Image (spheres, rainbow, N blue to C red):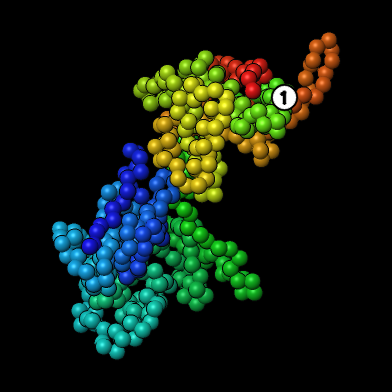
């Protein structure tokens, strides 16, 4: 019996997903086969077939954004009647070959009706056998395109069966920048093209504005790739953060001898079998951050424009580098955890991000109250992290480098220092408060004690 597969809902914050690698109509599937993958803000999930069957109907295609709980496909037995499941449904995708969409005309245009009628049977057949869009074009349109040095390959026609007609060229030319006579002739003869507004009077394209042709000997020496949906989301989020907040960064070093000594004890305990959790330097820094946030409630906040939201619990977010891009999962109630509990939770959410099965709700910026971004493993001595809005601040953790320190009585020695970079929203925090908070993190790192 045929059944409908719907788009699952992953978390309360997810309203739609991007479809990837969806099965086609006619594909046979067995229980457990992957029907399609779907991408939320920063995670990818897979939908498995609940039983054997054949894909009888597909409502969406790869790359489509689908609302959660919407119908995705129908699976049943080959040749099975699915009319009952289609009642009242409008397919998400229409067959563009069955109908021709009429494009609106922005202004009345005089058209020679006789010369713009449907192409002859010979022309239609020739166009059908030609995969090039520009080949299916009326003589008048072709002449105008040649005269104006206009490339029709990416143009959709509004004539019968998608044929490009003169009106289509005129509409496209109306939005294109004007060219000087020399530039127009060069475009026609040499196949050159201009990018953006020209440098001539009134924005006209001049001959010097043309993009040079690729070297004939070496050809094109670059490749353009579309950015992923996740990259778009990350870029949009980072840009919005800088555009909508007053960000400032303070840098400070903390004596790392204490945490390096603790780390040495951890390794020894693990080798002896008395400790099962691998507590890293990042875990120790995060533990110190949690302790400091409890002492500075003004930092453990969300800045909301007209108000500030103060949290009684610390929900610590951690920036995680994955093959698909940056993810920032949150460990909720981190202030209730011991050092081993925090270390285990941080590893759990980081692994879930890398595997692609993370809960979208804990990836939302609103889920965390403060974020830690550690680039020390890459050898960075200083960087400026960007705030994960609406959070009020973020801590960047840098690599450990030796620096001279006064040990007392005029004795100086090189001591390992771990770099700390605090970016804060100056609308939520004053410089003095931010400085005291950063200094306290250093104090906590230098005096941290744990029981193993």
Residue 134 in picture, x, y percent from top left:
38, 76
Residue 207 in picture, x, y percent from top left:
52, 66
Q: Residue furthest bottom?
A: 122
Which quarter of the picture shows residue 21? Answer: bottom left
Q: Is residue 447 left or right of residue 188?
A: right
The quarter of the picture where the N terminus appears is bottom left
The image shows residue 335, relative to residue 199, as above or below, that is above
Q: Nearer the viewer, residue 175 or 126?
A: 126
The image shows residue 420, relative to residue 170, as above or below, that is above
Q: Nearer the viewer, residue 443 or 154?
A: 443
Report the label total: 1
Q: Is residue 209 left or right of residue 377?
A: left
Q: Nearer the viewer, residue 196 or 137?
A: 137
Residue at 24 percent across and 67 percent down: it is 101
Residue 317 in picture, x, y percent from top left:
49, 32
The image shows residue 436, relative to residue 121, as above or below, that is above
Residue at 39 percent across and 72 percent down: it is 152
Q: Which residue is mark 1?
A: 261
Residue at 61 percent across and 32 percent down: it is 276
Q: Residue furthest top?
A: 409
């Amino acid at each position: 019996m045929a059944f409908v597969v719907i788009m699952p809902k992953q978390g309360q914050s997810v309203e739609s997903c991007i479809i990837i690698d969806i099965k086609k109509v006619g594909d046979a599937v067995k229980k457990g086969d992957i029907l399609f993958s779907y991408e939320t803000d920063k995670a990818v999930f897979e939908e498995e077939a609940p039983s054997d069957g054949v894909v009888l109907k597909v409502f969406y295609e790869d790359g489509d954004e689908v609302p959660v709980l919407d119908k995705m496909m129908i699976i049943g037995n080959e040749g099975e009647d699915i009319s009952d499941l289609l009642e009242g449904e409008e397919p998400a995708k229409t067959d563009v070959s069955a109908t021709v969409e009429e494009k609106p005309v922005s202004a009345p245009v005089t058209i020679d009706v006789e010369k713009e009628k449907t192409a002859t049977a010979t022309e239609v057949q020739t166009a059908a056998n030609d995969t090039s869009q520009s080949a299916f074009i009326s003589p008048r349109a072709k002449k105008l395109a040649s005269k104006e040095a206009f490339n029709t390959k990416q143009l959709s026609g509004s004539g019968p069966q998608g044929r490009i007609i003169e009106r289509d060229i005129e509409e496209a030319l109306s939005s294109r920048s004007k060219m000087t006579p020399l530039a127009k002739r060069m475009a026609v003869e040499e196949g050159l093209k201009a990018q953006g507004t020209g440098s001539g009077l009134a924005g006209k394209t001049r001959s010097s504005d043309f993009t040079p042709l690729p070297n004939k000997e070496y050809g094109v020496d670059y490749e353009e790739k579309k950015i992923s949906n996740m990259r778009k989301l990350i870029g949009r989020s980072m840009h919005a953060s800088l555009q909508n907040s007053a960000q400032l960064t303070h840098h400070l070093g903390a004596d790392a001898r204490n945490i390096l000594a603790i780390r040495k004890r951890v390794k020894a305990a693990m080798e002896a079998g008395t400790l099962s959790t691998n507590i890293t330097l990042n875990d120790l820094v995060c533990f110190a951050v949690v302790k400091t946030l409890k002492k500075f409630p003004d930092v453990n906040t969300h800045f909301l424009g007209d108000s500030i939201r103060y949290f009684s619990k610390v929900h610590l977010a951690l920036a995680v580098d994955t093959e698909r891009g940056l993810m920032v999962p949150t460990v909720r109630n981190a202030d209730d955890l011991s050092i081993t509990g925090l270390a285990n939770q941080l590893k759990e959410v980081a692994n879930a991000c890398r595997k692609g099965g993370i809960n979208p709700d804990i990836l939302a910026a609103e889920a965390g109250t403060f974020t830690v971004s550690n680039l020390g493993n890459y050898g960075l001595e200083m960087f400026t992290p960007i705030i994960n809005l609406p959070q009020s601040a973020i801590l960047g953790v840098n690599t450990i480098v030796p620096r001279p320190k006064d040990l007392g009585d005029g004795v100086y020695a090189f001591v390992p220092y771990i770099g700390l970079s605090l970016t804060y929203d100056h609308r939520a925090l004053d410089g003095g408060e931010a400085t005291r908070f950063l200094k306290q993190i250093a104090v906590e790192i230098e005096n941290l004690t744990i029981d193993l």
